[in-house]
Amino acid sequence: MRATAEVRWFLAGPIPDHVAAWFAGLAEGEPTAATRTDRYLCPTGPALNVKLREGQLEVKRRDAEGMKAALHPRIIGQEERWRKWSFAVQGGEAANDERWLAVAKTRRLLAYQVEEDGQVRRVSGSEAPASGCEVELSQVEAGRQVFWSLCFESYGDEDRLHEMLHRTAAHVFHHGDPPSLASTDSFSYPAWLMSVSGEW
């Protein structure tokens, strides 16, 4: 089980050039992009997320609804608490089942560790700290639609999830010229899937 605090935004269209350039600047170069297709069980509400990912069944349950998070003078999101369980599965029965929605993703991921004194430092994926915050910039294709998404996800020490997310966001948004992001575009994957599933 993994407990997280998350803030995510979805905006229509491909990743704008200035957003990609800003994110690349955080890593002092172009972050490695990875592409995969995940399959999501058609959501019936915004508080449960079930997906198949690379041989794993992941189940996420929302523990706390969105709390408005002002992360920058022109960046506001909805912070949510989640718990995630992962199970190894076999077979590809979902591939041809209309109850599962295919979402193609091209993801760029940065990882950060927040020290006890509040200092934030970027770490390589191989370091994998027990507690930290990941920042993800993705382009997602669902049905006939393309969106881009930015997400902060802190994990590990449950007592520090809020602190780690906010300190990482402050650190990240202090660099370069981050995009303006509104709370009206901030929601979870199941909430987003519910809004676009009619376009499959």
Image (cartoon, grey):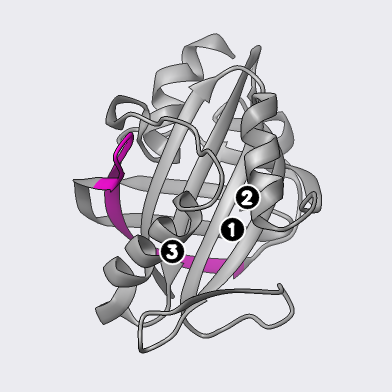
Return the disc, 1 or 3, that comes first in the chain's sequence: 1
At label 1, the amino acid type is Leu
Q: Secondary structure at mark 1?
A: strand
Q: Does residue 102 appear anywhere in the picture?
A: no
Q: Is residue 193 left or right of residue 40?
A: left
Q: Return the disc, 2 or 3, that comes first in the chain's sequence.
A: 2
Q: CA distance from mark 2 to mark 3?
A: 29 Å
Q: Nearer the viewer, residue 93 or 21?
A: 21
Q: Quadrant of residue 102?
A: top right
Q: Amino acid at mark 2?
A: Leu
Residue 7 screen position, x and y as percent: 37, 48
Residue 121, placed above or below residue 58: below
The quarter of the image holding the N terminus is: bottom left
- 127 left or right, relative to 160: right
Q: Is residue 44 visible?
A: yes
Which residue is depicted at the point 43% across and 35% down?
Answer: 9
Q: Which callout, 2 or 1, points at the residue further toward the start of the chain?
A: 2
- Relative to 123, is 170 on the left or the right? left
Q: Which of the pair 16/6 is nearer the observer?
A: 16
Residue at x 61% of width, y 17% of height: 13
Q: Quadrant of the C terminus?
A: top right
The residue that mark 1 highlights is 57
**Residue underneath mark 3:** 168
Q: Residues within 10 Å of mark 1 (few under 14, many from 20)?
A: some
Q: Secondary structure at mark 2?
A: strand
Which residue lies under the disc numbered 2?
52
Label 2 vs label 3, nearer the camera: 3
